[in-house]
Image (cartoon, rainbow, N blue to C red):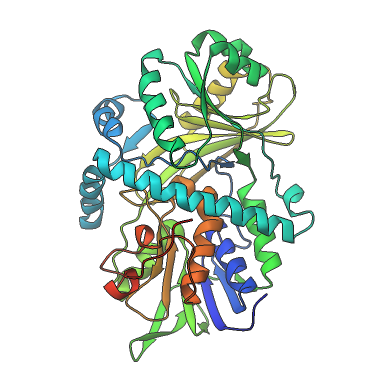
Amino acid sequence: MNAPRGSVCVVGAGIVGCATAYALARDGWQVTLVDAAAQPGQGASLANGAQLSYSYVEPLATPAALRALPGWLLKADSPLRWRPRPDVDHLRWLAAFVRACRASQVRDTTAALLVLSFLSRDTLHAWLAEQPGAAARSGHGRPGKLVLYRDAAARAGVQRQLDAQAALGCRQRVVDRDECVAIEAALAADRGAIAFGVWTDSEEVVDAARLAQALAQASGARLRLGEKALGFEQRDGRLHALRLQDDVIAAAHFVVATGAGAATLLRPLGLHLPIEPIKGYSITVPVVDATAAPRVSVTDTARKLVYARLGDRLRVAGFAELVGADRRIAPARIEALCDAVRQTFPGACDLREPAAWAGLRPATPDGRPRVGATRFPNLWINAGQGALGLTLAAGSAALLARLMARAEPGIDPRPYAPDAEACPSSARAPQATAA
């Protein structure tokens, strides 16, 4: 830990907020961590896909996604759903999403996210080394990741993407159907439907909720859980306190890390953060036949689903619904996840009582998180990691801690700076060295 720096209130105790609390505490800050839930990691972190996908960060907004969008929206069982809303911010987000689908922007965003993901990987490894037993308690492991493709025509485009990412430091390779089954024997029952795959042996898994809880505890932060943040009090152009239902929390600095709720919390301050909640689903089921369940992480691109083995449990997650702040669990989505397990890994799991979950991923139009300063000199943002919240949490937190300390950030912070409405040009100006 470094010398004391002052007090900071981190709002939001998901994996991003808990990582932020840990990074700031080890840097000498006196941290208060606030969340409406009774314990850390209960929102989008509770039962997400559990994959640390350091080499798979291409944003949702791509030319291919834009072309496929009409077909997805017309299918009743589509992995993507959209419920239009007559809301100005929602419509602005959609327009920005369409603009972000340009190939040149996708390349720039992918490169920026890879830099942040590699920082996140190195940071998390260092943190786990500081905490004996934390890796085991949070289910951290490195099984590698196999991405399945069921359309042979996609192979040329996938190889081009891998070639581009190889120049940025990724180590991945295309594998044929037989090698897919050799890597993951549990795919034998589904072998005939596989065209090819991409294998990345460096990818990892972790239980996000357990990791969030471990980081919150290890940070030594003052925990204010079960208390909802209602807004901020201002004085002389700075934030003075965070308002709760029956109390206020004064601090020298404040960090908003409330995921999909960040835009709502910041709006009364005149800050407009381009974040939309995108609902995803998961089931967690007990493994009853270890030989029939996947050992490595698996992503099925046709079904838009991910599988992650967490000890004697299998986490299956997927789908993307742009339906506002609707956390209701649709039974048809849960049944679709169960059906996918039956078809892909028959006999592997007990599917009679799946632990069903739905959470809101905080998505920006271009897929880049917003990490950095605002026009208030003591208000900072760390939000908008979308489906990559678990993957990018440690790196985003480490970057923010360096920015708050006015230290060399290690990577260029400009690609992740909050938008002009929230961030003054002076906060985005410094050139940093890329990692």
Q: Is residue 3 left or right of residue 263?
A: right
Q: Which residue is drawn at 64% across and 21% down?
A: 183
| Residue 60 vertical placement versus 378 (above, below) | above
Residue 166 or 217: which is nearer the viewer? 166
Q: Which residue is drawn at 47% across and 64% down?
A: 257
| Residue 240 vertical placement versus 381 (above, below) | below
Residue 334 or 67: which is nearer the viewer? 67
| Residue 230 vertical placement versus 19 (above, below) | below
**Position of residue 35 measured from the top left corner of the image (x, y, whole percent):** 55, 66
Quick one: quadrant of the N terminus? Answer: bottom right
Residue 78 or 425: which is nearer the viewer? 425
**Position of residue 384 measured from the top left corner of the image (x, y, whole percent):** 41, 55
Residue 9 or 109: which is nearer the viewer? 109
**Position of residue 109 measured from the top left corner of the image (x, y, whole percent):** 35, 47
Q: Residue at x 53, y 34 (%)?
A: 171
The quarter holding residue 292 reads: top right
